[in-house]
C-alpha cells in the first residue's frame, strides 16, 4: 500500500469526504492536488498537509463548466506532474421532493455528480495508459442502490456512478487503470448537515448499521489508500460500501 511518488488529484477537497481523502493520501506519501471552489478552505488543508511534511497544492476552480475540463486537467498536472490517482469526490445534493425538482436543479445535479467525473477522468487516461498504471476512485452513495426521501435526482446521479464505474473499468483496466467506487454511509459532511442536525434521525441511522454508529471521517482513510495503491491491483469495476454494515441489515 505504498504510493509515495504518485500524484493524486482530489475534487471536492475543500471539505468533507474529499478533503479527508486528500489528507489520507498525503500522509502516505502522495503529492496531492486539492481541487475545490473555496480557495481559503483549500489553502487551510494544504497548510495542514505541509505541516506534517506532505506535499500538496490548491486548485480553486468550478468544475460545472465541462468545456473548461481540459484546461483544469492541464492546471492539475502543472505542479507535480501527470496525475496517477484521481478521486472524484465533488458533488451536490439539493434534497428536493420530486414535485419541486426543476430542469435547472436536475441538470446541475447530473452534470456535477455524473458527467464531470467521466469527462475529467478521460482527460487523464492517456497519460495513465502511457505509464501502464492509474487509479480512478469515484464516490457513490447508499442512494446508488436505495431510495431515500427527497433524493430522486441525487439518487439517479449516484446510481449512474455505479454503472459508470463498471463501464470505466471495462474500458480502461486492460491498460493498468483500475476504476472503483466508494459508497459511504452517513458521515459528517456539508451534504449530510440536515441529517446531523436531527439527533433522533441520526440515532435511527446509527441503529441501522451493523456496527452501531455512523461514520467518522477517519474511517475513509484505509479504503481510500488501499484503492489508490498497488495493493488493489486486481480489484476493478467494484462499488464498495463503507457504511458500517448499513446495507447488510
Image (cartoon, rainbow, N blue to C red):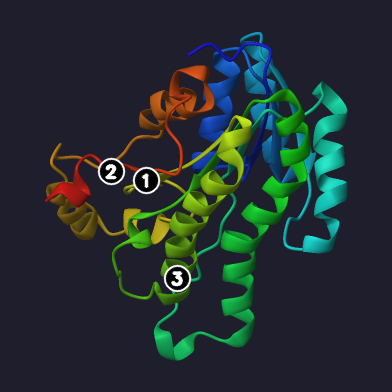
User: Dot 3 lies on which element?
Assistant: helix
**The quarter of the displayed image where residue 195 is located:** bottom left
Q: Which residue is mark 1?
A: 184
Please say whether residue 39 is visible from this viewpoint: yes
Identify the residue shown where x is 50% and y is 84%: 101
Give the answer, above or below, for where 193 lies relative to 243.
Answer: below
Of marks 3 and 1, the one in the foreground: 3
* Picture coordinates of residue 211, whole percent (x, y): 15, 36
Q: Is residue 186 left or right of residue 230?
A: left
Q: Are marks 1 and 2 in contact (CB under 8 Å)?
A: yes
The answer to whether the residues at label 3 and label 1 have Cβ atoms under 8 Å apart is no
Q: Which mark is residue 156?
A: 3
In-front residue for pair 88/49: 88
| Residue located beneath label 2 in the image | 243
Tell me the quarter of the picture where residue 193 sits: bottom left
Percent of width and height locating residue 13: 62, 40
Side of 137 relative to 30 (left or right): left
120 sits to left or right of 187: right
> Which of the marked residues, 3 or 1, is nearer the chain's N terminus?
3
Amino acid at each position: 500500500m505504498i504510493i509515495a511518488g504518485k500524484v493524486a488529484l482530489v475534487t471536492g477537497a475543500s471539505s468533507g469526504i474529499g478533503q479527508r481523502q486528500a489528507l489520507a493520501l498525503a500522509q502516505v506519501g502522495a503529492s496531492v492536488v486539492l481541487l475545490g471552489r473555496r480557495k481559503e478552505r483549500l489553502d487551510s488543508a494544504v497548510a495542514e498537509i505541509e505541516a506534517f511534511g506532505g506535499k500538496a497544492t490548491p486548485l480553486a476552480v468550478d468544475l460545472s463548466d465541462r468545456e473548461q475540463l481540459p484546461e483544469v486537467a492541464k492546471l492539475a498536472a502543472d505542479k507535480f506532474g501527470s496525475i496517477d490517482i484521481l478521486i472524484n469526490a465533488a458533488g451536490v445534493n439539493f434534497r428536493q421532493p420530486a414535485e419541486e425538482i426543476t430542469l435547472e436543479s436536475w441538470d446541475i445535479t447530473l452534470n456535477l455528480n455524473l458527467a464531470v467525473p467521466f469527462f475529467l477522468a478521460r482527460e487523464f487516461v492517456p497519460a495513465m495508459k502511457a505509464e501502464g498504471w492509474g487509479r480512478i476512485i469515484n464516490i457513490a452513495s447508499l442512494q446508488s442502490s436505495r431510495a431515500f426521501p427527497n433524493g430522486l435526482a441525487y439518487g439517479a446521479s449516484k446510481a449512474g456512478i455505479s454503472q459508470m464505474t463498471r463501464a470505466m473499468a471495462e474500458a480502461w483496466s486492460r491498460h493498468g487503470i483500475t476504476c472503483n467506487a466508494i459508497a459511504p454511509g452517513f458521515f459528517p459532511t456539508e451534504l449530510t448537515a440536515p441529517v446531523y442536525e436531527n439527533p433522533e434521525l441520526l440515532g435511527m441511522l446509527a441503529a441501522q448499521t451493523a456496527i452501531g454508529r455512523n461514520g467518522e471521517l477517519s474511517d475513509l482513510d484505509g479504503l481510500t489508500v488501499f484503492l489508490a495503491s498497488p495493493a488493489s491491483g486486481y480489484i476493478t469495476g467494484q462499488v464498495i460500501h463503507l457504511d458500517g454494515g448499513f446495507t447488510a441489515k
